Image (tube, rainbow, N blue to C red):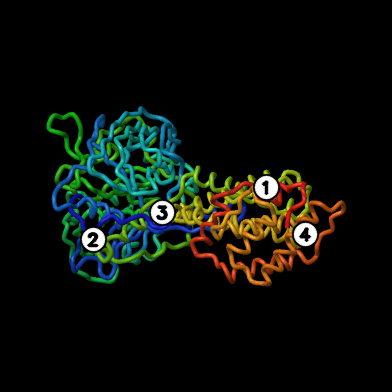
Amino acid sequence: MARQARVRLGERVGWFRDHVASIAMVIALIVGAGFTIVGTVGRLPGSGSGGGGKGGIGLSEMTSLRGMLNRGRTAEVFYVRGLPEQTYMRASTLARYVPNKGWERGSDPGGQPARGELPLQPGDRGEGKTTRINVEPRDWKSFWLPTYGAVRRIDTPDDDYRFDTKKGVIFTQREREPEPYEIDTVLSTPTKQALRLASGQKNLVDGEYYKFDGVEQEVIDLSNKIVEGATNDFDKAAKLSEFFNSPTSDFKYDLKTQGDVTKDALTDFVTRGKVGYCEQFASAMAVMARVVGLPSRVAIGFTAGVASADNSHRVISTDDAHAWVEIFFPNHGWMTFDPTPISDGRGVVPPYLRDTAPGAEEQPTADTQTESVAPSATGSAQPSASPDGQDDGQALQEAGPVGPQPWHLWALGVVLVLAFLLTLFLVLGLLGVISAGLVGVAWARKLLIPAAAGLWLIGVGLAAALLSWWLAVVLVIAGLVLTPVLVRAVRRHNRLHTVATLARASSAAWSELMAESIDRGAPVPAAETIRTAARRLAREHNLDDAGKDGLRVVIGAIERSWYSANPIADPALPGALAAVRQSLRQNAPLSLRARLFPKSVLKPTPAPVAETPEREAVPV
């Protein structure tokens, strides 16, 4: 394929559901799972009113790529230096075929951070000479970081890319413009004879790469007829490729497609239309390869481009966007087969598909690969989203790779575990289930309780960030705003609980009344006596008779607790405190601002006089 498209890259979709299970493994609290489907087209891309019947065999990731790159002109997207030979640049791969819909990515990409040395991909035996290639993005904004061959190492200043060895792709969670990067990769490929003799455990290949559910019998029969006489997998693949691109083939490359003939786009293309562009050729061959027992996938990316004017680098442009087929061979990995009959010189024919003299050999080596499992006769691909062209943003919204960084999951798990354990310790200590220890010390409580609240706030923020960092920021800000309210509520609850138990009840009651007064904008000077402070409280807040009576009971309880040789708790104290508080609510109600930002929390005052009693008689 190589030119002009019409679908724009969308944005990535929610990846929170994709990784709830990972969080659950860390904190053993939640279990969940999900997956995101790469959208597929409902009509052959660029087909106008025709092409593909009610469905299509195009590739939404490819059409999205072309839509993003299409500016009505040719645009340079990469400068590549150090590339010794022409070869394809892979951006992404698609594994699941849905009849009349197209190709989906299949399982979500995973892997490890893409920096420095990279693990070997399935089928890569670690052999072959590595080549250092420098890639300079020019006008490229995507989830994918294109590479060449069997990548062994990548050096990039960007730290948020990941490498999926199963799919052979490097990706990031967010669409971005990457910095220049360098890769060490093996470009050499096995010989034709080595691929013919390739043998190994077929159950190493994922069953997804064998499935061709829903393919019409006409296509199945044609596929088997094409490979008649082939005695090995390589010859089968070569025959299928030649069916589309040999000089005697009836197929033609064109951006225009034939009109509808039947409801099945694949059948229309391979038996009647025979005119299309790279998405259709790659889609058709990949399906037919599976029909004859070959594990296959569709790769999307770019052709080799053209040399610069001074021959110092290769220029990859929007004209080079392309799709091709990759077929897995045991001990060799994924081999390139391009069925598109390109005639403009941009196509690349691998050495193993060129005519060579009998017995001619190249240095066999590993190539690109993906992991696999034994083929399964069951299972079906899921239908995709909307028809091509109906929703520009949909295509790559579903195509974008997703998933939080490992540090994010670990940080979230550790914070939630610490918050849970600290909260449990505080609750058990306050309830007396365990020895109070530090919980019984006032200054320790003042540190531990905010620490637990802070951990929960951080945990909520990290959890929300799995869905959106903006949501996390909003929640953290909301938590910070509500913190004074929550602190005031906790202190009020603790004091009222102390008063109810009649243990040190008088001091707790007085502290709560002082906080109520401060919240209403009437702080009590620390130098004032209890009775002076009480008169100020009654005057400032217009206490009614019931409130004044309750206040007298509170003052009396405080004085007895200070000066009595054997102070006895006054059982009337809880009711008296409730009466004072009720009078305050009725006669000096708090404003909304005072409720949200309690001054007793935000502007702490010296210790109330009840906590530093005078030892002389208090004047009436």
Q: Residues within 10 Å of mark 3 (few under 14, many from 20)?
A: few
Residue 445 shows which numbered tag?
1
Q: Earlier in the sequence, mark 3 or mark 4?
A: 3
Quarter in which the C terminus is drawn: bottom right
Q: Residue at x 50, y 64 (%)?
A: 592
For marks 3 and 2, the one nearer the N-term is 2
Three-letter amino acid code of the residue under disc 3: Trp
- The earlier-in-sequence mark between 1 and 4 is 1
Under mark 4, the amino acid is Ala
Labels 1 and 4 touching (C-beta < 8 A): no
The residue at which mark 4 appears reads as: 557
What label does residue 357 carry, if any?
none
> Closest to the observer: 21 or 98?
21
| Residue type at the position of mark 2 | Pro
Q: Is residue 590 above or below residue 233?
A: below
Label 1: element kind? helix
Between discs 3 and 1, the one toward the N terminus: 1
Across and down, in percent, residue 261 comes to 22, 71
Instruction: Say which of marks 2 and 1 sits in front.
Output: 1
Please state which of the two labelled residues, at mark 3 or mark 1, is closer to the viewer.
Answer: 1
Q: Secondary structure at mark 3?
A: helix
Packing grade of label 4 (10 A; few <14, some 14-19, many >=20) is many
Amino acid bearing label 1: Arg
Q: Which residue is mark 2?
A: 45
State which quadrant residue 286 falls in. Answer: bottom left
Q: Which residue position is annotated with label 3?
A: 470
